[in-house]
Amino acid sequence: MKGSAVAARHAVARERVVIVGLQPNLLTGGEAESSKALFVTLDPLRKAAGALLAAALLVGGCAVRVPVVTTPAFPDFVFPAAPASYAESPAADEQRDAWAFLQAGDLAQAETRFAALLARDAAFFPAAAGLGWVDLARGGYRDAVEHFDAALGAATRYVPALVGRGDALLSADDVSGALASFEGALAAAPAPARVERLVGELRLRVMTERYDDALAAVAAGRLSDAEAAYADMIAASPESAFLYLELARLKQLQAETAEALVWTRRARQLEPNEPGAVLLEASLLEALGELAPAEGAYELAEALDPTDASAAGLARVRRELQLAGLPEQYRGITGAESATRGDLAALLGVRLAELLDDAAFGAPTPILTDTRDHWASPWIVEAARAGVMGVGAGNRFEPERIVRRGDLADVVAAALVLIADFDPQAARRWQSARVEFSDMSPGHLNYESATRAVAAGVLRIDGDGRFDPIRPVSGAEAIDAVERLAQLAAGLG
């Protein structure tokens, strides 16, 4: 075909290849009159004729000088080289020629040549990849993906097609698909440096989007969706400890404590001394009743990054460990309808041990006639020796006597005096306070004690201002009062 410029349009569908276009204005003489366009259809029954036509097109195309490219039009495109099995085939040279036209910006000539190569040899997948790059240059992202997929159907690890597919999907805003293609390219063989950079950027972008999805799902109560988002992120970035930690917290929200502990420990395998992970592990161990390991984890959390949560957790676990070694009667105080003097002495002896020891220093040990066989005998002696609980006539302590609100107020007031001895400034607010009671006048036997106990925040009055001095104290109420005293004493040096 003399002086002709062939522009071929290639489509792969129903085993046909359609090549369109001899442009009449580029033909000479009678050829322009008789040839407006050339349509050639290859079907399965005429493959031989198609091969001849493809050869003719290549021969005709050879009349167009292959450009020498000094400045590529598409420098980021990856040349789809022929595999080693085509090393001695003319197709390898013809593939390079077609690529030269593409990089020279002559997309029509490049498409014609790639299409002819593919029509002549359907197994020559580099030509399909070449058509994908032509589509990408034109902005036909969907067509490009189809051509790259065709090449990958023949060679799944073909880097030029993987990179091209990634570029096309990224241009079409399919970030996850693009990332998968680029990661495939990196895994298959050395890829252009830009691909490694893109993988890093896209991973961060996907992680950010999925992290936002996870947070939104948690806020909306869609915990299973949040879990799926974290699983996706972990799959994309398995070395990110914080993702395991976030998933552990999610499992904790779902009351799946044991599984939460598994994920927390995975986070700690990556970052053993991350304070948040250590603290979470401590709280999970505590929830599972594994108090000794929980104590160790809380101690490590305190050493790494002391917080109110770690301090409170450590104190709580130590109390639980202490409680576990205490008599059964002590553990039963919580559910008692009425606390006894022996119960109260035991609570004081356990929770205010240091304060009582300091107060009793140098004081004589009282001789009690009715406590020797009582389960709380050691703590009764300490409470009496420190002066926070009195001893009656005949050196009787009466450990089984029910404690009433007025009695508890007297004991609390005595403990507050000990605290004030060590920290007078802190005691001023409850020492000078005056509280109005609707059921007690200033002359009442328990008025002063009740005033101090209420002012210090250890005991409470009801909404009508009643103190109820003769009401029996429950075990839970006694525990609460002693715990509040312990909190006041905690700041003493």
Image: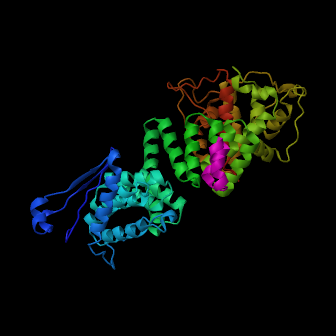
Q: Is residue 16 above or below residue 36?
A: above
* Image position of 381 (left or right of 259): right
Residue at image position (58%, 48%) is 245
- Give the side of residue 111 with respect to residue 321, left or right: left
The residue shown at (58%, 38%) is 252
Where residue 357 appears, as percent x and y from the top left, is: 80, 45
Residue 62 percent coordinates (x, y): 30, 71
Above or below, comparing residue 232 to residue 453 in the picture: below
Range of the magenta residues?
261-283
Q: Image quadrant of residue 20?
A: bottom left
Magenta segment includes 329? no
- Between 142 and 328, the one nearer to me in the picture: 142
Place of residue 167 in the rendered image (x, y in percent of width and height, measured from the top left): 38, 59
Main SS, magenta region, reads helix
Q: Going by the image, does 260 lie left or right of 113?
A: right
**What residue do we see at 14% from left, 59% from top?**
35
On screen, 467 above or below 100? above
Q: Residue at 82% across / 27% down in the picture? A: 397
